[in-house]
Image: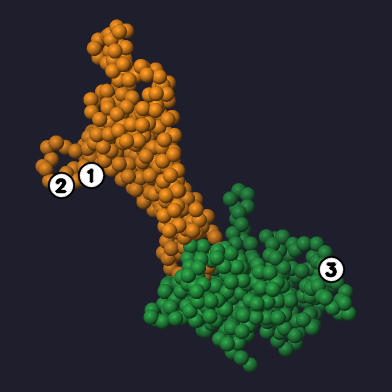
Chain colours: A green, B orange
Amino acid sequence: MTATLLNVENLSVRFPVKRRWGQSTWLYAVDDVSFEVKRGETLSIVGESGSGKTTAALGVARLVPNSAGHVVLGGEDFLKLEGEDLRRARAKIQMIFQDPYSSLNPRLRAEAIVREPMDSIGTAPVEDRPARVAELFEQVGLRPEQMKLFPHQFSGGQRQRIGIARALSTNPELIICDEAVSALDVAVQAQILNLLRRLQRDLGLTYLFISHDLGVVQHMSDHIAVMYMGKIVEYADRLSLFNDPKHPYTKALLSAVPSVDRARKVERMLIPGDPPDPLNPPKGCRFASRCPLVEDACRAAQPPLDPVGNDHRVACIKAS
Amino acid sequence: MALLMTILQRLAYAALLLIAVLVLNFSMMNLAPGDVADTIAASMGGADAEVMAQIRAEYGLDQPFLVQLANYIGRVLTFDLGYSYFYNQPVTKLIFERLPATLLLVITAQLLALIVGVLLGVFSARHPNGIANYFVTLLALFGYAAPVFWTGILLLIAFSLKIPLFPVGGMIDVTVEDNFFAKAVDIAHHMVLPVITLGSIFLALYSRLCRASMLEVLGSDYIRTAKAKGLTQREITLKHALKNALPPVVTLAGLQFSAVISGAVLVETVFSWPGLGQLALTSILARDTPTILGILFFSALVVVVGNLLTDMVLRAIDPRVRGRA
């Protein structure tokens, strides 16, 4: 059993929403979510658009305001840090962002983008920094002569490599990949995913991997959390989740993955309708309005995330 | 090398543009009613047609239009802007006497407006909902809406008349002792009000544009990246945001250079600043065509040079512009 690196407890992220007559309410994009990530492993969070998976990642990285709960990394609660302490602690949690085109400052050379965190937080001695930048470039598969170029002179995949080198520059303990490959075309996706896996193996990195692509998730993860409307509905290790999904939403998601294997063709499980209004979430299970197995008890109270097996938790009263 | 080619290319365009300006100015002057003969006749207390014709012949005004135009352009190409009828001095000499005063005023006002405008813009973009932001907005609206001469007169009444902090007009006090430092201080003292007056409009413009541009940049993904990297707020604002927000402001400042010069005409009149603007006004009233044409030509020259400099500055702050023509 490996040690837990990141422990997220009761994380909520809410946004103020203005209504008429100056009233405002809160939209809970992430609602009371708990999970842990073990050192050297990859936890993926999957879910449809608007399920709160990216917001959860941004909440962990302290990049959105109005977060509540605990994000404990190495005995320190990341959500309690402020100001200079928070800034220095950011070295431990780094992000790789979705869009490699807009997330790099167009006016900085690749070298400066990678080097800047070291200069700002001081994670390496001054005299070692040029060598460290060169080493990072090599680790992510970029050529040393590309260090002097500007972001627009790179392709999408190369830009994402710069983003990865930048994330590595502070020697982080946790790297959050927020849809890190979804802006890239499939061939490049595979290269970047393999690079991420190689880096994990070589450097012992821990990933929190946010994706909507189940194929990518299956390739990358040790554990998977499925989110729906700001809640985790199922958490399991990879094999259990893909072979024995318990929650009807997870089943529906998995059945939606297209397969090239004609023999393995499964019956598509369709879920009708749209998710309910997030400003006014249902009292009971949030999936109740679209669930094929729904019964009255589902609408009465929110099902807790209960264990159904070894390392497998489901928030559904019909699952156990 | 590419840079040199670009500069040469720009200079060639600039030369063509200046010749076009010359032709246009000269034609317009000829279309306008009245000439120097009228003024001279008026100052003599009236003259008959024969004397008028004699005066016109003396100044070459009886020649056909195209001949006059060709003569004029020919002379300008040899850096001879003609002879002022009114001041009885070469126009070039007149202009070079006045040019430093105007440039001093215009460049100081422009720099002040840029620096303070950008600072205010950055400040209000960083606190978009604060009270100070509304104050900056109000100041900008006032600066932009108020006519220059009105602001000038108001400042004169307030800070020269009621509270006599600054001189009423002029550029230098004749009683000041003749050493460089004392003179510089005296000129700076005279400059305060005119510079504030001229700078106020442009300050308003730059602060608004800088605020809008900063707000846009601050919302972009790479600012979030910078924050996630763990940079300080200062590094994020100055290095990542401002550097990306500045080009529109610099471009506008370059384009506004001509407006600053025309604004200077009004400000110089209000504050009796001995610059080109004042010279322009008196020579227009005197129908002193060569002087007016000379001033217009010089203003065009200053604007063209200003735009050229803007391009160079943009290259310096935006690496992406480099390498493109």
In which chain is the residue bearing label 3?
A: A
Q: Residue at x 34, y 19 (%)?
A: B61
Looking at the image, is mark 1 or mark 2 earlier in the sequence? 2
Q: Say whether marks 3 and 2 touch (CB < 8 Å).
A: no
| SS category of the residue bearing label 1 | helix
Q: Residue at x 16, y 37 (%)?
A: B173
Quadrant position of the N terminus of chain A in the picture: bottom right
Examine the rendering and report whether any part of residue A192 can be seen: yes
Q: On the picture, is A86 further left or further right than A231?
A: left
> Circle 2 sits on which residue?
B180
> Circle 3 sits on which residue?
A270
Whole-percent x, y for residue A267 in the image:
88, 74
Q: Residue B172: which quarter of the image? A: top left
Q: Nearer the viewer, residue A22 or A198?
A: A198
Give the residue at the far bottom of this rendering. A1
Where is B62 relative to A93, above or below? above
In which chain is the residue bearing label 1?
A: B
| SS category of the residue bearing label 3 | loop
Q: On the picture, is A161 further left or further right than B273?
A: right
The residue type indicated by label 1 comes to Ala
Q: On the picture, is B220 further left or further right than B147?
A: right
Indicate which label's residue lies in the foreground, 3 or 1: 1
Q: Say whether marks 3 and 1 touch (CB < 8 Å).
A: no
Q: Residue at x 47, y 50 (%)?
A: B248
> Circle 1 sits on which residue?
B188
Whole-percent x, y for residue B275 in the image:
27, 35
Residues at marks 3 and 2, CA–CA distance in whole angstroms:
87 Å
The residue type indicated by label 2 comes to Phe
| Mark 1 burial class by Cα count in 10 Å: few <14, some 14-19, many 20+ | some
The residue type indicated by label 3 comes to Leu
